[in-house]
Image (cartoon, grey):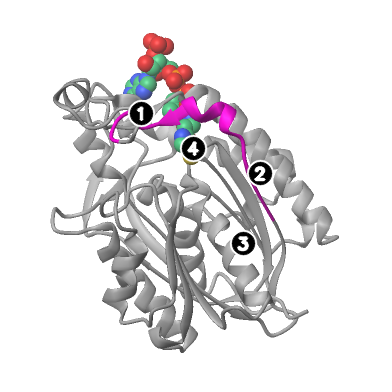
Amino acid sequence: MAIAGILGTGSALPEKVLTNADLEKMVKTSDQWITERTGIKARHIAAPEEKTSTLSVKAARRALEMAGISPLDLGLIICATVTPDMPLPSTAAFIQTELGAKDCCAFDLVAACSGFLFGITTAEQFIKTGKSKYALVIGAEILSRFVDYQDRGTCILFGDGAAAGVLGIATPPAGILAAEVHTNGRHADHLFIPAGGTVKPASEDTVQAREHYIKMRGNELFKIAVRNMEEVSRRVLATAKVCTEDLNLFIPHQANQRITDAVCERLKVDPGRVYSNISHVGNTSSASIPICLDECVRSGRIQKGDLILMTAFGAGITWGATLMRW
Ligand SMILES: CC(C)(COP(=O)(O)OP(=O)(O)OC[C@H]1O[C@@H](n2cnc3c(N)ncnc32)[C@H](O)[C@@H]1OP(=O)(O)O)[C@@H](O)C(=O)NCCC(=O)NCCS
């Protein structure tokens, strides 16, 4: 059976930058604490007129251009996001219209920071079965609209951004070689937004209680993130019968530099083969991995034939890994 691969990538970061020095003026924190505990120095913040679909469309156009295909060729559009333009309809619907794509299947996917990997695993099935010739998978977030800038435990971590990948039939030996995606809802209370859904519809009380903002148990998540990303990476490598020494590049979700370091140490990945942009991008949830991927492709860090492992972890909790040859 033919295998799917990523044919083009694109990303978009908002212009405005929020530095640790800026945050020092907003909450009781310091550049030193944030840098030492997370590795983050700055993150991008969307302008008031920018929507999740605005960033998505910018990223998607760049990915389509690299892949050399028209929006009219798309059979599937998946927008992985936890920060949609609005609860109804899907952000993918707005993206489809803005791009000028046909009436193809377009939907949003909620898997938080693992969203892009969930998206490409889903799109891969459409491509392999011949259901779609080309699929567009986007990871896009404007987390700054859901972050409580009075909560120093979360507001230092998150940033805004979007990135996209165009999938189609790959030319061997390139393509997606192995992938796994998982969810464990028993830890849903580790990272969530309490209000705005059916449990607690928006009301004056929920706004007063700041319940429309992200709540997180950072410490608990940290440990599970390291363990799950290590384990799923090992399994995906084993499925493809390769080992960490074979990897040209390892792209972990950018949640915290200490999480990345711990995962790499456990997997024994050569630090020179690990990509990190967390210092200037922060955690952009579903956009994190594809932004890294696009930066590596465009800078020449990824070369034809390279073996690349991506792994992610996020709210849900969700996690997964994808191994591909470029
Ligand atoms: C959030 C995170 C950076 C906190 O780092 P940590 O080393 O675990 O810190 P703790 O939560 O144990 O807090 C240690 C102390 O620092 C304080 N602290 C927390 N945030 C702070 C900040 N921004 N500035 C200064 N101090 C801070 C805490 O209040 C606590 O103080 P105390 O000891 O007096 O109670 C870290 O847990 C993390 O990155 N977790 C993963 C989160 C994540 O990735 N979420 C998304 C999943 S994709």
Question: Mark 2 against mark 1, which lies toward the viewer?
Answer: 1
Q: Quadrant of residue 208?
A: top left
Regarding mark 2 in the picture, which secondary structure is present there?
helix
The residue at the far right in this view is 241
| Residue numbers of the magenta segment | 180-196
Regarding mark 1 in the picture, which secondary structure is present there?
loop
Q: Amino acid at mark 3?
A: Thr
Which dot marks residue 315? Answer: 4
Q: Marks 1 and 4: in contact by CB < 8 Å? A: no
Local crowd size for mark 1, using a 10 Å CA cut-off: few (<14), some (14–19), many (≥20): few
Q: Residue at x 68, y 72 (%)?
A: 306
**Which numbered disc, 3 or 2, marks the residue that appears first in the sequence?**
3
The residue at the far front in this view is 198
The verdict on label 4 being within 8 Å of ligand 1 is yes
Residue 189 is one of the magenta-drawn residues = yes
Question: Mark 1 against mark 3, which lies toward the viewer?
Answer: 1
Which dot marks residue 121? Answer: 3
Q: Residue at x 61, y 30 (%)?
A: 224
Q: Quadrant of residue 147?
A: top left
Q: Quadrant of the N terminus?
A: bottom right
Which dot marks residue 264? Answer: 2
Tell me residue 36's x, y (percent). Answer: 43, 31
Query: Residues under labels 4 and 2: Cα distance?
Result: 21 Å
Q: Amino acid at mark 1?
A: Val
Q: Residue at x 27, y 26 (%)?
A: 211
